Every structure is written in C-alpha cells, then in structure tokens.
Image (cartoon, rainbow, N blue to C red):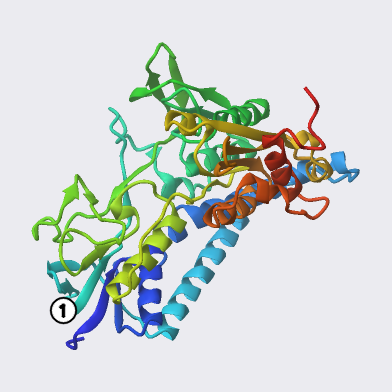
C-alpha cells in the first residue's frame, strides 16, 4: 500500500461504489475504504431491506384481494421470520455482487475508518495511503430527532424497524420520507395499528398536491390514522406505552413503539474540518463537479447534504470519479427522479404545478386518473393519477408526477423526455403499447392541450 494511488475512496455505499468503479473503468489504481458493510445504508439499512419486506406485504395484499379476480384462497398466514430470511438473503447476495464487481475491476478494499491527514493522504487501519485524488463518500448516519424524550428505548430508527420480528399493537411513525410511508403500509398490513404523524399540512410535502391528497386517501381508506400539521413536541412514557404530545392543538398519540428516524451527514472525524474544508454544519460543501474547497479532494452522496437518494449518490460518485481522473463532468439534478415504493408507488421529476408557478412559469397541466386506464382497471389499481406540468408557450415539460403501480419505472420515460428536451408535443406522438400504463402518460401529455380521447369533455 505504499505506492501512490490514483484515487482513494472513503466509504463503500452507493456513492463510494460508483466512484470506485468509475475510476477503475478509467484505468485508475483505486483503493476503497469501508468501515462496516459494503453497500452503505441503502443496501444494509434502508432501501433494499425496506423494499424486500414491502414486496412481501404487497403480495399479501394481492392474495387477500384475490376474490376480486375470481380466485378463492384460504386466509394467508404470515411467517415474519421467513420474510426476514428472504430479505437477508437478498442483501447478502447484493453485498457479494458488490464485492465481486470491485474485485473484478481491480479495486482494493480496506476495512476501517479513513481519516484524511492531508490533501493527498489518508490514514486507515494503522497505515497511510497516498493518492493523487481523494473522494469522500461516507454517507449519512442515523440520529435522534430534536424532540424531548426521543432517547427513550422504544423510539427506534429505520434500521431497527427493518429488523422487528415481534410487532407492536400500536406504532407511531414520524415524518414523510420514503421509508416512513413505506413502513406505514408495511406494519399496517401486518396488523399493527399505525398512526402517521406529519408536522406539515401535507404528507409527502415535496410531491404534487393532488398526488399527496390521493395517497392520503389510500392510507385513510385502509385504516391508517393520519395526523397532519402536528409537530411532535415531546415523548414520554405512560405505563407500557409511549405518549407523543402534538402541537397545534392536535392532542396526543399513544403507541408501544415510535419510528422517528432522521439522518445526518457522516463527516465527523474525517479530518476535513481540521484541513479547512468549507462545511455547512456537518455537510461537506461541493460544486457541480463534486469538488470540495480543498484541492485534490472531492465528495459525493449523503455527506454532501439533501436530497438523499441512492441514485443521486451514484450519479455524484460517477461525476466525482470522472473529474478525479481528469475528465470534465458536471452534475445536473434537474431531472433527478423521486420515488416512493409505496402501494401504489409515487414518483416524480421536475417541478410541481405550484413550484413552476412560483418560479414565474406560465403553466398548463394535463392529468389522467387511473380510473379510466384499461391497464389499471385490469389490475385493480385505480386510485392513482398521472400529471404533466408544461410551459404554455412552447410545451416544455417542466415536471411529471405519477401515482401508479410501477411509477418508479414509468417516471424514467419522463426523465428521458426531459433530458432530451422533448416537449409535450413530442410526447403526444408516442404510440404506447396497449393496454399499458404508458398510455396514461401519453394521455396526460395530450390532456395538456385537451386532446385526450379518453378524458371527459368538460
């Protein structure tokens, strides 16, 4: 390890894996430092385990509703240990694949926590690695919310929630992040009485207003209790239960377990502050080339702040690696999709109608409810909608918003259209397969000019 490397990457999550792989593809000698498990929080604590478990309850819901499709089945039983074994197998397989990819591309992996000792040297596991460039990809770490009583034993984070084998009778979930909404449906499907608490007036605050309202109705109709505009002021114990005191006159909520997770950039102890790096609290500040204020040092992923999406972290890692290897790459997040793997899924890209208007755009909107989609009717999932926000003058696509089964896949069509600077007029010309959800996306584009053949004439 004494030889000088091209790149040292600190952190083996989504950003770090992408950075190490891309630098290696470009011919670099690369060492990746990881103190725990490769794959980071996404693979080991949040995205992958959450989606593996929600896939199980999504199937459970389909089985429970099989009679609607003319199929009679006995009441399904739940083996939660088997669900977790499947989840753990998926995670282990993905970790193994990550290790194999890195090894096959010649990336050396070192176990330990790296500390930057100067702009071209990292100390780890008692050794000193020197490199032309350093890329910091240390992700984020779980933290307690700033609420009195948040340190009580039954207040848990995402990682703990994903490992629960004994289910509480009552569960309170704070917040609007993807894992919060996904956990709401997961635990409710398994029989928990769930209360979702949102401090603001709208669940999924960043989403389109109509989409958020529709999803709120889905939760309400399923029996989930929702508290909006209800900031949690304190948590205390009452007997065997926890009591959450809510502001704005919203009363209180009792639960055996509270899911109150948040994450902070994992930058403590890296040595960046001591070297004079520009920081915003715990956030490492970077430009659109993922360069920090320190020469030779880049950063990517959650450690650079919001928004925290695994696919954004991967993109940042690639940009950082390409620049570290002498190319010129910049990050454009205008077409970054947001995806919630709920039932139905929620996904969007670009601006909401309200955001576009606030930025001064003269907008026009096309939208199609899934209640008129042949595909949605066939599959019995008609609660969603598809909405396109466009500039009135030229038809520029400013945003696309989808609540539908498979929304996380369908949104990629809108992303591609926006990347190609296509207008709604070009999207209108697409001949989508029939029957498919893609028809509804094209219909929403047609509805921008009220040309849909399937929307009612008002």
Residue at 60 percent across and 36 percent down: it is: 188
Residue at 60 percent across and 41 percent down: it is: 395
Q: Residue 378 at x, y = what percent?
A: 84, 44
Residue at the far bottom: name it.
Answer: 3
Q: Nearer the viewer, residue 25 or 427?
A: 427
Q: Nearer the viewer, residue 35 or 335?
A: 335
Name the side, left or right, on which 449 lies relative to 393: right
Return the residue at label 1: 127
Give residue 272's quadrant in the image. Answer: bottom left
- Residue neighbourhood size for the residue with mark 1, other residues' Cα within 10 Å, grouped as few (<14), some (14–19), many (≥20): few
Give residue 192's quadrant in the image. Answer: top right
SS of the residue under disc 1: strand
Q: Nearer the viewer, residue 279 or 431?
A: 431
Q: Residue 361 at x, y = what percent?
A: 48, 33
Quarter placement of the C terminus? top right
Is 317 above or below relative to 127? above
Is 342 above or below relative to 317? above
Q: Residue 331 at x, y = what percent?
A: 38, 58
Q: Residue 258 at x, y = what percent?
A: 43, 34
Is 386 above or below relative to 412? above
Residue at the far front: name it.
Answer: 393
Name the side, left or right, on which 455 lies relative to 205: right
């Amino acid at each position: 390890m004494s030889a000088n490397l091209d790149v040292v990457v600190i952190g083996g999550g989504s950003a770090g894996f992408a950075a190490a792989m891309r630098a290696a593809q470009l011919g670099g000698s690369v060492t990746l430092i990881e103190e725990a498990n490769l794959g980071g929080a996404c693979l080991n604590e949040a995205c992958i385990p959450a989606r593996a478990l929600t896939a199980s309850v999504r199937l459970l819901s389909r089985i429970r509703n099989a009679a609607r499709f003319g199929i009679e089945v006995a009441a399904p039983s739940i083996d939660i240990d088997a669900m977790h074994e499947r989840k753990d197998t998926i995670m282990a397989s993905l970790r193994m694949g990550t290790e194999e990819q890195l090894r096959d591309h010649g990336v050396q992996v070192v176990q330990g926590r790296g500390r930057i000792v100067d702009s071209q040297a990292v100390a780890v596991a008692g050794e000193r690695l020197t490199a032309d460039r350093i890329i910091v990809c240390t992700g984020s770490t779980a933290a307690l919310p700033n609420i009195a009583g948040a340190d009580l034993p039954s207040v848990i984070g995402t990682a703990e929630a994903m490992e629960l084998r004994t289910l509480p009778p009552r569960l309170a979930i704070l917040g609007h992040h993807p894992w919060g909404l996904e956990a709401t449906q997961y635990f409710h499907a398994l029989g928990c009485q769930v209360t979702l608490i949102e401090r603001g007036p709208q669940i999924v605050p960043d989403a389109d207003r109509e989409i958020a309202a529709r999803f709120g109705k889905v939760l309400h109709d399923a029996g989930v209790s929702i508290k909006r505009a209800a900031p949690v002021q304190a948590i205390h114990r009452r007997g065997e239960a926890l009591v959450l005191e809510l502001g704005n006159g919203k009363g209180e909520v009792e639960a055996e377990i509270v899911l109150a997770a948040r994450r902070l950039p994992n930058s403590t102890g890296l040595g960046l502050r001591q070297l004079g790096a520009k920081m915003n609290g715990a956030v490492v500040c970077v430009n659109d080339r993922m360069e920090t204020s320190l020469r030779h040092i880049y950063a990517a992923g959650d450690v650079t702040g919001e928004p925290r999406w695994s696919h954004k972290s991967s993109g940042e890692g690639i940009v950082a690696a390409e620049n570290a290897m002498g190319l010129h790459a910049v990050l454009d997040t205008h077409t970054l999709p947001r995806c919630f793997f709920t039932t139905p899924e929620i996904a969007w890209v670009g601006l909401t109608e309200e955001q576009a208007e606030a930025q001064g755009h003269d907008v026009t909107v096309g939208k199609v409810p899934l209640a008129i989609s042949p595909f949605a009717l066939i599959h019995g999932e008609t609660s969603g909608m598809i909405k396109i926000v466009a500039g009135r003058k030229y038809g520029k696509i400013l945003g696309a918003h989808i609540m539908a089964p498979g929304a996380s896949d369908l949104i990629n069509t809108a992303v591609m259209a926006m990347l190609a600077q296509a207008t709604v007029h070009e999207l209108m010309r697409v001949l989508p397969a029939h029957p498919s959800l893609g028809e509804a996306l094209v219909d929403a584009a047609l509805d921008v000019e009220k040309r849909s053949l399937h929307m009612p004439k008002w």
